Amino acid sequence: MKVAKCEELHVDAGWDVYSFLKLTTDSGLIGWSEYNESRGRRGLTNLVHSFAESLIGKDPRNLNRIEADLNASGRSTSGGLQAHAIAAVVNACIDLAAKSLGVPVYQLLGGKVRDRMPVYWSRCGVVRARNAALFDGKLINSPAVRSLKDLTAAAREAKERGFRALKTNLLLFDENGGRMHQPGSTRGTGHPELNVEKHLVKAFVAQLEALREGAGPDVDLMVDLNFNYKPEGFRRFAKAAEPFDLMWLEMDITDPNALAGIRQSTSTPIASLEAVLGKRPLKAYLEAYCADVAIIDVQYNGILEAMRMATMCDAYEINVASHCYNGPLSMMMSAHYCAAIPNFRIMECDVDEVPWRSQLLTNPYRIENGDFVLSDAPGWGADIVEEVVRAHPPKR
């Protein structure tokens, strides 16, 4: 079996664009993976195609050799877009390798530890606030979030739908509705200083109160602060969060020792590392003992490297939560990873979706009572329905 053709497909997802790599072999077997060119990754498709094209005429089942060659070819500019592109190619190859044997991907990872994975509702209320114009039946029947009262209703919905945990980001509400506070991404005021003012801490506490009111005492709450503050600010938020008994407070920072200092300053569990790509950069963070939970993304790292990263975390007694807030195939990829690692914490899940999102897969995944139900079908368990992709081309 040899790779004969590589293609990239893109589909509108309302507030995002999902991208898929398709590898076709001379035997007719097709392998799929998902990647994402949004959020500062413009140009990624060109890299994905370049790396994938280098596989034409080669056997995609030689995973170790393929991964080693791809890493070597991008060594002078490793990390960043290079890592994302290599991950997309490796993930499509492992889909092919599993399909060629008629087994699910998790079998190639040593088998599954579990059949069901607890998931949390990611960006709960945030998507409905940032994209309010698409909700209230205009495209999506779910209610928009324009106030703390609406946020309480969103948390109540999460509980009623069986989710045992939810995650949000800092939202600021005014007469115009809600918006994310993201100075670390140059959205809104506060960049590049990334200082924390009192009104931000007050908004943070009010948001947690609203979520707790809707979700009740038994649903775990999480907040992701991303790269939006300096250590001093992260510590202030962590202190304010302590009465709410969060599952974790999530943050990203480039200095492992600074992150360790934040963790040591609070009783609130700290989750991080989603932006750490590969085992070598991960080493410094583990040695600093800077996180209670490691966030690792299969789509960013490739599932083989993500497995190595989970093994490293296990040696430091750290459990892993998947990072996954992209399209439906990315959810399937993440599920195989979460099923195979022993040190699993919880799986991320984007719940709000455009009406055609579930139609993108030949075999849509299932979430029952807050658990992702693992498929035993070959490969990832589903292929991409190209007709649906082409019926919804990206607007940008």
Image (cartoon, rainbow, N blue to C red):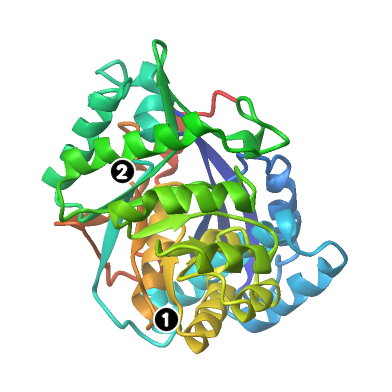
Which part of the image, by quadrant, shows the C terminus? top right
Residue 241, placed above or below residue 180: below
Amino acid identity at mark 2: Val
Residues packed near mark 2 inside 10 Å, few (<14), some (14 to 19) or many (20 plus)? some
Q: Which mark is residue 101?
A: 1
The answer to whether any part of residue 364 appears in the image is: no
Tell me what residue is drawn at x 55 percent, y 60 percent.
Answer: 274
Of all residues, the one furthest to the right in this rendering is 76
Report the residue marked by disc 2: 351
Observer-side mark, 1 or 2, equals: 2
Residues packed near mark 1 inside 10 Å, few (<14), some (14 to 19) or many (20 plus)? few
In the picture provided, is 82 more to the left or to the right than 109? right
How many numbered tags mark residues here?
2
Distance CA(mark 1)–CA(mark 2) = 32 Å
Q: Earlier in the sequence, mark 1 or mark 2?
A: 1
Residue 123 x %, y %:
38, 42
Numbered disc 1: secondary structure: helix
- Determine which quarter of the picture holds residue 312: bottom right
Amino acid identity at mark 1: Leu
In the picture provided, is 58 more to the left or to the right than 361? right
Residue 13 x %, y %:
44, 33
Tell me what residue is drawn at x 50 percent, y 33 percent.
Answer: 198
